[in-house]
Image (spheres, helix red, strand yellow):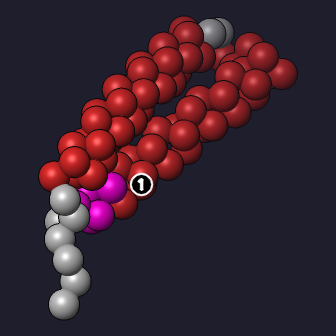
């Protein structure tokens, strides 16, 4: 039979989860700001190098937020 995780480790995981959630929210806010800036660019600039660079940054930030959510999901599973 598996032993349950002790309360100290659960508290540590909870603290880490909270930090990761805060980081995820900060990344999402940056992504949203970058998306808003991109959306406000004239169409001629959106299709150019500057627009492509902004789109790549938006995509990377989106992946980073998704990866943090995956981490949060795994941590949740660890304490179930």
Which quarter of the picture shows residue 59? top right
Residue placed at 56% from the left, 33% from the top? 61
Magenta segment range? 75-79
- Judging depth in this view, the residue of 62 and 18 nearest the camera is 18
- Magenta run includes residue 77: yes
Q: In this rendering, is residue 79 above or below 13?
A: below
Q: Main secondary structure of the magenta part?
A: helix
Residue 62 horizontal/vertical position (percent): 52, 38
| Neighbours of disc 1 within 10 Å: few (<14), some (14-19), many (20+) | few
Q: In the depicted view, which residue is nearer to us: 31 or 42?
A: 31
Dividing the picture into quarters, in which one does residue 19 lie? top left
Q: Mark yes or no: residue 43 visible.
A: yes
Q: Nearer the viewer, residue 52 or 59?
A: 59
- In magenta stretch: residue 74: no
As drawn, which residue projects farthest toward the bottom? 1
Tag 1 residue: 70
**Relative to residue 13, is residue 23 depicted above or below?**
above
Q: Position of residue 8 (x, y in %)?
A: 22, 48
The quadrant of the image that shows the N terminus is: bottom left
């Amino acid at each position: 039979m598996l032993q349950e995780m002790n309360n100290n480790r659960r508290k540590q995981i909870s603290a880490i989860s909270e930090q990761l959630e805060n980081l995820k929210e900060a990344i999402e806010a940056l992504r949203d700001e970058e998306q808003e800036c991109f959306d406000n660019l004239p169409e001629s600039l959106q299709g150019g190098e500057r627009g492509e660079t902004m789109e790549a940054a938006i995509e990377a930030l989106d992946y980073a937020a998704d990866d943090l959510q995956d981490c949060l999901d795994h941590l949740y599973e660890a304490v179930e």
